[in-house]
Amino acid sequence: MSDIVIAPPMVPEVVRDAGGNAYLRHALGTASAVGFEGALALAIASAPTGVVITDPNLPDCPIVFTNPAFLKITGYPPEEVLGRNCRFLQGPGTDPAATHLLRRAIAEARPVTVELINYRRDRKRFINELRCSPVFDADGKLLAFVGIQHDVTARVRAEREAVKARAAAERANREKSDFLAFMSHEIRTPMHGVMGTLSLLLDTNLDAEQRAYAETSRRCGQLLLATVNELLDLSRIEAGRLKIGSEPFNLVDPVREVLDLVAPAATEKGISLSASLDHRLPARAIGDVQRLQQVLLNLVDNAVKFTNRGTVEIRMAALPDGRLGVAVTDTGMGIPPKLRARLFTRFVQAEGPPLRQQGGSGLGLSICKRLVSLMGGQIAVDSTPGKGSTFFFDLPLVPVPASGAPPSRLTPAVDAILPAVPLANGRILLAEDGRVNQLVAAAILRKAGYTVDLARDGAEAVAAAESAEYDVVLMDVRLPVMDGLAATQAIRQLPGIHGRVPILAMTASAMPGDAEACIAAGMDGYLAKPLDRGQMISAVEDVLNARPRRPRAAIPLPEPGNVAPLLDRETLEELRSAVGPGRLPRLIQIFVEETRARLARIIAANNAQHIEDEAHTLKAAAGTFGATALRDAAAALEMACRKGDAPARLTILDSLASLVDRTMNSFPAQPLTRTG
């Protein structure tokens, strides 16, 4: 480095005072001029801080004074320090910007503090925190610079280690959040099939035992989904990604929603469920209604879960300090003192048979505490074993002016009946690559009166949207070939009504920004998997009600006939084993419906590419269901279209309708049973 210039000692003779301070003999006058003598000299000598004085009136501003602490820090004897410029302590790694700042301050005779990489006599590095100040006489003449020096190596090293540790922790937290987001998608995808299939199953004629099994399975699925959601919430909170909203809302809405959601469980146990609201509260307030409802639902659901008889009540009050006070009180089994002390710690669950059997992830109350804290409040619990518990929390209350007062008492809605879903007879394109999810979503939509076409990747979805008019497109975000976002953007480039078709996203991802990405791509809505029938139909109806609907005729369902040689019985038997007992007839029905619809599209198509695409899909579906002859015919049709062999294509098309009829009639009306 250009700064590393070692100046030879100006005068080799060095003197020490009684305290061990070292001076250049010829500079004693300078030292005396700045008053370093007597008690002051002894004080400086005993200071643990390194002190040096340099004389700017001598060539190269040499060191003319040093105390013992400086010699100890650097490891040099005074003979090798006095008479030299301080730069001799510099070396590789010394920050040029810091040295430039120091030189500039000296040139301008002003104080400065810098951190420098310096080297001891044994060439070991240390970090020197230097405070350099000018000293002037009564006439304003610059006499000297005083340098106060600290070895801050340990402190800087600790700070750097802390920064590294913090960065590593933040990286680990991000990786954990990304992992949970990925796992959420991977869990939600099969859960979509599980919950949808159970919903379909519960719509069929089941005996009491079968319905009990199905209801138990659905409840387990709901608990699993709730755990996934809790893990995601916890991850978002810890990663600082969960944002608290601030919008006006009706104070009664989250209370009524929680009462209606928990009412079935409370009614089953004979528990009285109600809410009371202070008349001094505003009817409307500003805050995050979704998170308030989440905390309330968790507390009320727990109260019902751990209460076998008596009451569960929500109470909202206006506190004297202008805050909202919320209490959830039950007459349940109570909480032991030992557990209360750590109740809001994550993964803590109740112990003992009567408590532990209620299950849960142990995350709910921990998340409640964090959500309440994020909203600016505190949460606590008071409980007496055997007599019940009260969970209470407070939140900032920002009233909407002149909004009135809420009702004083609420109870769950009585005999609330979901409206029947009207038969819309609309045409829907379902872009979904998972076979189970295709089955579930298509079955739900067809039961509601819709005609459903399938696309197994984004490119198929774009081609289908271009070739036909649909009322709605349900688009999975993660599709092969072309993902759902890219497919949506491509559809939006189509001319006319084809490019304006409403598109609803279906995705198992549930992280912040997913919904915004879908809307930015041109989608009209966002549905998170797993979806139950009500959510899906409601979303489709909302879209259809917002635009004129074209009535469409339903595709007739053929009557199954007897088993014929057109069917590969072994393949169908393997399918029966794969899907489980009882599901094959419904699968066959769906396959028949789709094949009839696909045949109609093939016959109506005036484009060889469209026929090839439909034939390719028909080939795969027919092979899955053991329709060997139809599979071979579809493969031949696909090849003829690909080669541009128009005569061969027309020949196959002439016989395809008859082959489809004979194949569909060859499927059994009842599930197959293995023989032999």
Image (spheres, grey):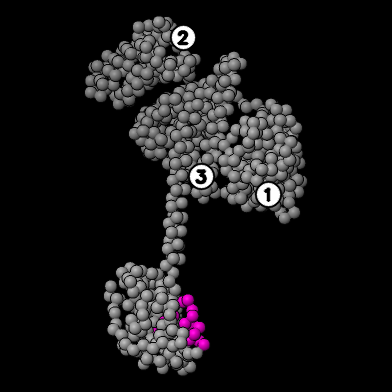
Q: Residue at x 36, y 88 (%)?
A: 14
Give above or below for 265 relative to 57: above
Q: Which residue is mark 1?
A: 394
Residue indicated by mark 2: 669
Horizontal and vertical percent for residue 379?
66, 47
Residue 156 within the magenta-colored segment of the rendering: no
Check the image and report above or below for 158 versus 437.
below
Q: Earlier in the sequence, mark 1 or mark 3?
A: 3
Q: Nearer the viewer, residue 123 or 223?
A: 123
Nearer the camera: disc 1 or disc 3: 3
- Label 2: state its secondary structure: loop
Residue 15 image-quadrant placement: bottom left
* CB-based contact (under 8 Å), mark 2 and mark 1: no
Report the residue marked by disc 3.
235
Residue with the most extreme front position: 18
Label 2, label 3: how many angstroms apart (C-alpha)?
50 Å
Inspect the image, locate mark 3, and give the three-letter code of the amino acid beneath it: Ser
